[in-house]
Image (cartoon, helix red, strand yellow):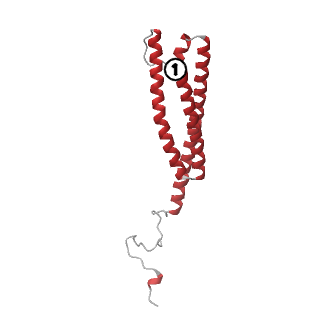
């Protein structure tokens, strides 16, 4: 069945997404920006492939429906299963389950990556804040009333 073949391809593609997500986790943890960029380029190519496979799945579903004399739009695999014979039901259900497992693992890994990136950004912002003096603080003596716009002279500017 064509639909089963498409689900196999989708499952394999999502396995690749999972591998890339794990590589991304390591790249973020180690701060390897070049590796992260390469992974993101690979993901972009995989997303294009995913779009093509999803279109192929929709065409296969529509073709199957037409062959059965059924007219429906936006049919899911779940809705087709009851119309299949036992062997086809088992195989399609197996690949549907595997695909859903891969999608779930990918989502969890991406959630972890999102948390790592947010934590990295917080650390970067905290580090930047630590290196930049707080401009609202007044470093002059409280009794002098000098404004910040006055020219200040360094002790090294004085004549010996």
Looking at the picture, tell me which residue is in the foreground, 88 or 134: 88
Residue underneath mark 1 = 2
90 shown above or below 40: above
5 shown above or below 133: above
* Residue 24 percent across, percent down from the top left: 57, 45
Identified at 57% across, 35% down, the residue is 106
Label 1 crowd bin: few (<14), some (14–19), many (20+), radius 10 Å: some
Q: Which secondary structure, mark 1?
A: helix
Looking at the picture, tell me which residue is in the foreground, 53 or 98: 53
Looking at the picture, tell me which residue is in the foreground, 16 or 151: 16
Identified at 44% across, 74% down, the residue is 144
Identified at 43% across, 14% down, the residue is 72
Identified at 60% across, 52% down, the residue is 30
56 shown above or below 135: above
* Residue 54 percent across, percent down from the top left: 47, 27
* Residue 105 percent across, percent down from the top left: 60, 33
* Residue 117 percent across, percent down from the top left: 54, 47
Looking at the picture, tell me which residue is in the foreground, 115 or 153: 115
């Amino acid at each position: 069945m064509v639909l089963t073949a498409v689900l196999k391809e989708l499952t394999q593609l999502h396995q690749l997404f999972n591998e890339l997500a794990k590589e991304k986790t390591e790249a973020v943890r180690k701060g390897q920006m070049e590796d992260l960029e390469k992974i993101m380029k690979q993901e972009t190519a995989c997303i294009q492939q995913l779009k093509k496979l999803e279109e192929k799945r929709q065409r296969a579903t529509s073709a199957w429906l037409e062959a059965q004399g059924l007219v429906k739009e936006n049919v899911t695999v779940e809705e087709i299963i009851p119309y299949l014979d036992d062997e086809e039901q088992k195989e399609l259900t197996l690949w549907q389950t595997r695909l859903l497992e891969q999608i779930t693992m990918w989502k969890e890994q991406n959630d972890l990556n999102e948390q790592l990136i947010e934590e990295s950004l917080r650390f970067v912002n905290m580090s930047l804040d630590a290196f930049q003096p707080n401009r609202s603080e007044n470093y002059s003596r409280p009794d002098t009333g000098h404004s910040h716009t006055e020219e200040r002279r360094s002790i090294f500017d004085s004549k010996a």
